Image: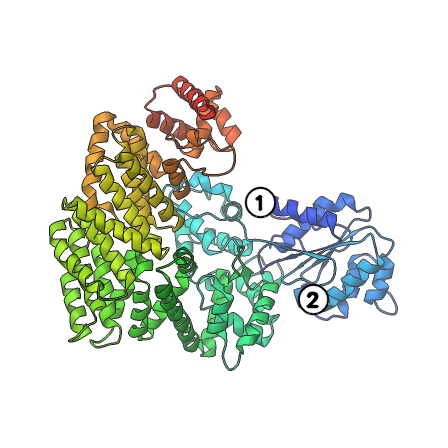
Amino acid sequence: MGRSPHRTGSDVPAEITTFVGRRRELGEARALLSSSRLVTLNGPGGVGKTRLALRVADQARRAFPDGVVVVELAEVRTAELVPHTVALASGLLDDPAGWTAETLAERLASRHLLLVLDNCEHLVVPCALLVRRILARAPDVHVLTTSREPLRIAGEHTYAVPPLPVPTWAEGSRAADLEQYDGVRLFLDRARAREPGFTLTEATAPHVAEICQRLDGIPLAIELAADRVRALPVEEINARLGSRLRLLTTGDRSASARHQTLLASIAWSHDLCTAPEQLLWARLSVFPSSFVMSAAEAVCSGDDLPSDDVVDLLTELVEKSVLVREQGSEARFRMLGAIREFGHQRLADSGGIAAVHDRLVGWCAQLATAYREGWFGPGQQEWSRRLRREHQNIAAALRFALDGRRPARAMAIASDLNLYWVTAGLLSEGRHWLRRGVEESEPGTPGRATALRWLAYLSACLGDVVDVPRLVADARSEAGGEPEPADLGYLCFVEGIAQLTIGESYSARTPLAEALRLFARTDDFVGRTHVLLSYGVTQWLCGELDSAQELLRECLHVSGIHHETTLHSSSLLHLGLLLRDVGEPAVAEAMVLEALQLKTRCDESTGQAMCLDALAWFSVADDPRRGATLAGCAEAAWRRSGASIERVGALRRFRAASLEHLREQLPERVVDALMTAGAELSTTQAFAYATGAPAGGAGRDLAGIFEPLTEREWQVAQRVAEGLGNRQIAGRLAISPRTVDAHVAHILTKLAFGSRTQVAAWVTERRRSTQA
């Protein structure tokens, strides 16, 4: 979109609309072109390959004495016409014998020019033959091509054109921050072209951010959405994006037919695929998130698509820009949203959607079983990371199973993942799936007793204990007359957890003691270790310190033998709290810091929150400013986890006492400002602040960032110390003066200062202490 009509000769077509962003891509593509004679810009339809190629060509034209020749191949339909079209664009007179790759290469042999072949994907073979001949016969000709798949000839350097960067709107985001993203800038530019009065406000900013994100940063899609602002408010555009392909059906009439709508652009890619590739495309659309090769083989293969063929077909779809391979050590693939939607419609039309859904459910069931069997051991961290990567696929499988009236399969998956829901901070989601499975199944359904047990457990962890007795009773009934000791042990464990959650520590002792007795008759180390931890915490809260230490140290021992991390770190945390109580603060803090390190490594947000809260309590007396900042870090971690310290009756009294003590030592506004600063830190920054570990690259001034300002506020404070005014600071940091005004106000509040001079003195002292 946004290009002038076709032109021939040595001129690059003039740009009609603004070229937005792409600074990094321009630099990288030009560097490739300077070192290679053949560069192919590839990517999905609408990603902006043509616009980038023309801008690169325009910037590079001085390096080519004979100029730039742009050849548009979108409307060329036969291989024989490719050399003719290139010759015509090059200003060559018609050859009576007709143009061939050989004759054209001979005529270009004496020229020093850049040849741009735009839209080669439907003519890959003839384009490859022509370019190979030109490179061999015309040593001073460089070729820049755009295509949805590479030419695959010797000497070709491919550059994958990425979507535009887009923001994620989160709590605390501001409209002023959005225009640093090229995707938003493109939307605003095109929207203002259609509706000159269009402005980005705090009310519209979340919708603009979500529109750009839901469109995956694809320029064509963003332009088509922005084109709607004249008729629809952005709130409604965002609401209607549930079906991207239906909304984005009009565009620039001067653009090529395949670029006038997003649907046409994707359909063009679909037509270029073979029948097996189209079939795999449709089946892969059941994955809402990225996926691994083994998942694609298991879910997408069948009688009409052998498993052995999936690897090669998947590779072809990557080459044709239908799939994107994600960066990382593990080979993961994904579809952009609109491409997936197109494929899913084809799958629905084929009538084979139920079978593919069923295979995805089966694959996720095997994954969940393997997780349950492998979680308690040295592979725990990798299992946790793997489940997080597969989370959306698992959620889709659970939904497919329940919508397809197969609650037993859904209950089995959700039950096997009971520890994932807890450690990943997904308690409410896990309870949702378990509750649906229980409600939609009949008594006696296989796996219903186990699902009831874990439903009761997650409810207790969430502090919602009202239904726990009924759920436990139902689970006992489902288990039958002679349940296994481990099954009874888990039910006693859940009863104890429910009491512990509401602060009834003494009431929790009896069921937990019984659970420990039952697990002693089994080889279920997972259940036994859970009970050792919970019973140890209970005894500590009841004042039975010797018993508590014995139980917690036994938990450390068992988990340590099996190289387990989650329960091991929780034991360290609670043993540290106990040792603090008995007068061993140094040992206690070391244990909690080790626990925080393990919880952070495993990305356990609830555990991180508890560790940060504990360190805040430890700091209150000796360093109240640090204690307040850590309390803010903990509050943010609790929010990220989806849990709340208010639901942990055994621990919330410590938080209340520490906050009361803080407000006795510091003015309330300072405590609030310090807690706010802590809450603004990311997980990595909070860990660095708590432990003193590096938070980023070399030379980063941790003291300036974390005591107690955010990184941006520290940057502003340093400019204040240099004597700059707010407008000068805005220019230096490339932000608005209004944003600087807000930062300076926050700095004064957080530091409890009344003047910029005090800020300057504080910065000077901070730098001195950092260098010491």
Name the disc covering residue 21, or none.
Answer: 1
Q: Quadrant of residue 661?
A: top left
Label whose residue precedes the other's in the sequence (2 or 1): 1
Name the spot of residue 65 as percent of width and height, x first: 82, 46
Name the spot of residue 438 as percent of width and height, x first: 24, 69
Point out the image quarter for the N terminus.
Answer: bottom right
Q: Nearer the viewer, mark 2 or mark 1?
A: 2
Q: The residue under label 1 is which amino acid type?
A: Gly
**Outermost residue toward the bottom in this view:** 303
Q: Quadrant of residue 62?
A: top right
Name the spot of residue 326 as percent of width and height, x first: 53, 57
Name which residue lies at 37% across and 66% down.
368
Q: The residue under label 2 is which amino acid type?
A: Val
Name the disc covering residue 124, or none.
Answer: 2
> With respect to residue 715, does 753 lie above or below?
above
Name which residue lies at 55% across and 63% down.
323
> With respect to residue 686, does 236 lie above or below?
below
Q: Would you say residue 603 is visible in this rendering? A: yes
Name which residue lies at 41% across and 18% down.
761
Front-lying residue, 626 or 2: 626
